[in-house]
Image (tube, rainbow, N blue to C red):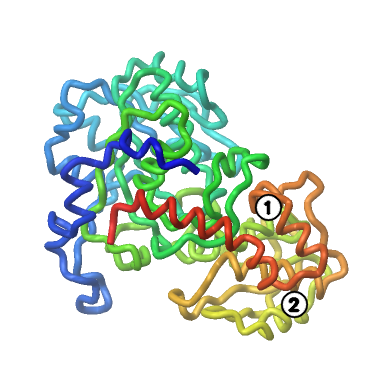
Amino acid sequence: MSLSRRGLLAAGGAFGAAAAAGTGPAAAHPAPGGAGGAPARRVRTGFERLAADGYARLAGQRVGVVTNPTGITAEARHIVDVMHADERVDLVAVFGPEHGFRGTAQAGGSEGRYDDPATGLPVYDTYLKSGRPLADVFTASGVDTVVFDIQDVGARFYTYIWTLYDCMEAAALAGKRFVVLDRPNPVTGRAALGPVLDRAYATFVGREPIAQAHGMTVAELARLFNGEFLARPAELETVTVSGWRRGEFFDATGLPWVPPSPNMPTPDTALVYSGTCLFEGTNLSEGRGTTRPFELLGAEGIDGRWAEAANALELPGVRFREAYFAPTFSKFQGRTVGGLQLMVHDRAAFDPVRTGIALLVTARRTWSGFAWRADGWIDKLTGSARVRTLVDAGATADEVAAAWEADLAAFRAVRREYLLYR
């Protein structure tokens, strides 16, 4: 990776500098730990800081917003509704990602083109659009500035960050400004974890070589994309969060949680997702169709031996409960399956990616029916054939993890240049 284009980055102006240095509004908030366990420090999202500044960054611009149901204020009002009602903003379009602007579509779906009943604004579909076709959508919408505000969950294969990437590329092609309104990484931004994608395996669940759990916010990723990967960098501005520190989980923010997608109901789901989503690439259920997606894993024919083998590894921060469940949709719909439930008891010690690999290894060893999906999805999720090949060869979880350490160390070094928060 080259760092030759760092000078092209827009670092977020005074907002970004103040948050990074701890001198602006971010420094005025005390650490969490108020009465009743609620956070005493008030975290303000990028949108709230934009609004508090009177939308000065959008003055004189025809604005379009890339967002979904997570684009809300601390009072749970959607930012599109707020801006549409504010005469200081000339909001002319909305752009919906996978699952749609209002979030009605399941995985692999979108809402298409329609007029939003609440505001009358035209809603354009960005899902699976990129490059010139997406640039043409921005041009047709008549916007001057594209604003991005979506809550991410910290995993490379969660598609909203690649919507961000595609929209930045398209905005550059169409000659549009691009403003990212930041939100906290709900599973902390302490470290990057897991394998780094090989570009030969690039898809919409991984466009560029970043780690499986990237440990960044969307504004930080936007800076990384602009500085490292985009052939034509976007005219980028970022509005940072205030009051958030990298080591904090979502419940420390005081912000309301809205499921970013139908199978991401809680921050607990996000905590395990970057590891257990790997089971999408197998013939086991990843818990879709249950009330605990990605925390419940299983298949017909699995019994308590899997949970026993996983607990014997004494993985940090997590225990496993033998579990039986009947998914209401997706794999094994309406059929009772056996498996396990992840129960994280120490979030700080828990490593979701290493845990996901350990569960693949133990599932394969304890259940004779284990198989990978025939379409090679596991390679797309892990970013190469390496994990699958090593697991098939009988490698331990530690041996699998050792194979990605050099690439991960290189990514961490590059990542460090684009971080905005302490």
Q: Residue at x 28, y 25 (%)?
A: 63
Measuring from the top left, give residue 342's x and y in whole percent.
59, 73
| 318 to the left or right of 150 | right
Q: Position of residue 195 (x, y in %)?
A: 60, 57
Up/down of 61 relative to 100, above or below = above
Identify which residue, 267 or 380, lies in the foreground.
380
Tell me how many marks there are.
2
Q: Mark 2 and mark 1 in contact (Cβ < 8 Å)?
A: no
Label 1 neighbour load within 10 Å: few <14, some 14-19, many 20+:
few
Which of 22/217 is in front? 22
Q: Give the image quarter of residue 355.
A: bottom right
Query: Which label sits on residue 262?
Result: none
Query: What kind of residue is marked 1?
Result: Phe
Residue corresponding to mark 1: 329
Q: Quadrant of residue 320?
A: bottom right
Residue 35 percent coordinates (x, y): 20, 78
Mark earlier in primary sequence (1, 2): 2
Crowdedness near tag 2: few (<14), some (14–19) or many (≥20) residues, C-alpha within 10 Å = many
